[in-house]
Image (tube, rainbow, N blue to C red):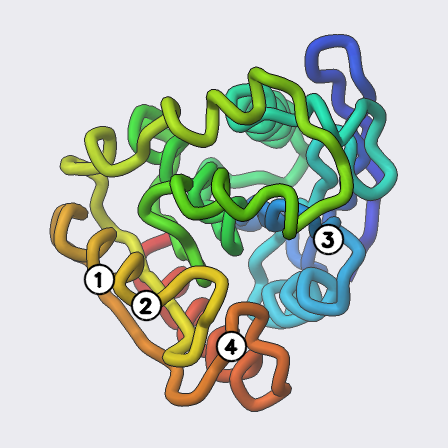
Amino acid sequence: MREQSLEILSDGLKLRAVLHAPAVASWPLVILCHGFLSHKDSLKYRRLAQVFAQESMATVRFDFRGCGESEGLLSESSISRRWRDLQRVLEKSLSLEGFDGRLGLLGSSLGGYLALLEASHNSKIRCTVVWSTPSHLTELAKRLPQVSQVEFSQECLEDLLTVELLPRIKNVEKVLIVHGEKDQQVPPDHASRLYEVLNEPKALHILEGADHRFSASEWREEAISLTIGWFKRFL
């Protein structure tokens, strides 16, 4: 597996990313989108990059603005701005040497929300997998003061309520939803609602006993196995 550091500009801010490419001449690519207060260097995303490479698929894991190693303020990282970050990462990825044109998205929690937003209008996205992903952000808006000590901008607060997902994804297909049965941050009914709205082919898998982060290794490995199978089928 080859690792390559990437620097991507979004609204003048430098986003940090890492390409993990398998040892083959050409490969499909999956962009990894982390959650609200997460970052690209968590064990989850490093493990995903390793497993994808073993299956001859490349990944790009990156930090949204204000997160991890990327520039910008977390307090100003609204849904709209993070969506632009994802779009800039996708644009950069299309020109990577070795990329064979097959493109997928994997997002966790808010990263899954953004992945589905992008899949709703980007025809280059062949398939998508989302973990622990909300169908709406109303509850997050209410809980924001408890979730983070950062005082978010007015744009961030407004975006949580106005950048709606469900009306946009009625024609989105080839989506796998993986959700924890015991997810207290994003209850499983969010996953059911996403599944109802999405187009076929689609799949919903509820991990028995799992929490929001799939914190136990067996939950995480089951989610990874399901994810790899989905991308092998549709990417």
Q: Which callout, 4 or 1, points at the residue further toward the start of the chain?
A: 1
Residue with the mark numbered 4: 211
Helix, strand or loop for disc 2: helix
* Percent of width and height locating residue 30: 53, 49
Badge 1 density bin: few <14, some 14–19, many ≥20, Cα 10 Å: some
Amino acid type for the residue under numbered disc 1: Ser
Amino acid type for the residue under numbered disc 3: His
Helix, strand or loop for disc 1: helix
Amino acid type for the residue under numbered disc 2: Pro
Residue with the mark numbered 3: 20
Q: Which callout, 2 or 3, points at the residue further toward the start of the chain?
A: 3
* Percent of width and height locating residue 84: 56, 20
Residue with the mark numbered 2: 188
Asked if labels 2 and 1 touch by Cβ distance under 8 angstroms, the answer is yes
25 lies left or right of 171: right
Q: Vertically, is 220 above or below 204?
A: below
Q: CA distance from mark 4 to mark 3?
A: 28 Å
- Residue at 68% x, 67% y is 44
Residue with the mark numbered 1: 192
Asked if labels 3 and 4 touch by Cβ distance under 8 angstroms, the answer is no
Q: CA distance from mark 3 to mark 1?
A: 32 Å
Q: CA distance from mark 1 to mark 2?
A: 7 Å
Amino acid type for the residue under numbered disc 4: Asp
Q: Which callout, 3 or 1, points at the residue further toward the start of the chain?
A: 3
Q: CA distance from mark 4 to mark 2?
A: 10 Å
